[in-house]
Amino acid sequence: MIRRCLVCPLFLFSLLSVGCRTLITVGPVETVLLEDFNIVTEARIDTGAELCSLGVDSVIPSADGNALFFVHDGKRYCCSRARTVTVRTVNGTVSRPTVELTTRIGNRKKRCEWTLADRSGMQYAALVGRNWLSGTALVDVSAGERPNEKENF
């Protein structure tokens, strides 16, 4: 029993020390690069959101349903559709299409799923959710806005 108690703290310490070296610190707002389309936008970091979300003006599925055309900041983009998800909002639940995009904040990039939604009434055009943050970043709201700005693109 004593041996198990000594091994567990050492194991946990090794996991934490390895994990902490690979994480970056992000603030409440970051500049995000969506590398697939070279879209640079300000994003709110939202630990309550499961998936990232990009504000778009419109979404049009292709005739076969395998691709999506969307308009962001007046420019039209086309990409493969990943799936459709149901998202809870303050107004209830809605279905949204998702796409896989390579996302970069500071010197870290990760491929993850983004929902496409009308965010015209929101302050930020994008949200970065737990699917990008998990295993990649620690959120420090005291870091201020855009702590990774000097490392961006």
Image (cartoon, rainbow, N blue to C red):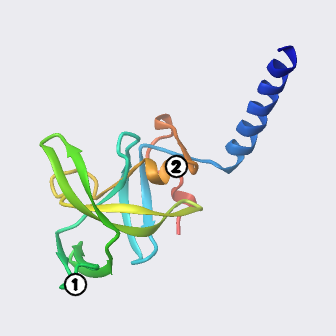
Where is residue 81, by image quadrant?
A: bottom left
What residue is shown with label 2? 147
Question: Residue 45: image x %, image y %?
Answer: 40, 47
Q: Nearer the viewer, residue 54 or 14?
A: 14
Q: Is residue 35 above or below residue 20?
A: below
| Numbered disc in front, either 2 or 1 | 1
- Which amino acid type corresponds to the residue marked 2 in the rendered image? Pro
- Which amino acid type corresponds to the residue marked 1 in the rendered image? Asp
Q: Is residue 143 above or below residue 31?
A: above
Q: In which quadrant is the N terminus drawn?
A: top right
Question: Residue 113: image x %, image y %?
Answer: 40, 62
What residue is shown with label 1? 64
Question: Residue 100: image x %, image y %?
Answer: 40, 68
Q: Nearer the viewer, residue 37 or 148?
A: 37
Q: Is residue 150 left or right of residue 58?
A: right
Q: Residues within 10 Å of mark 1 (few under 14, many from 20)?
A: few
Q: Is residue 89 above or below residue 71?
A: above
Label 2 residue SS: loop
Identity of the residue furthest to the front in this view? 1
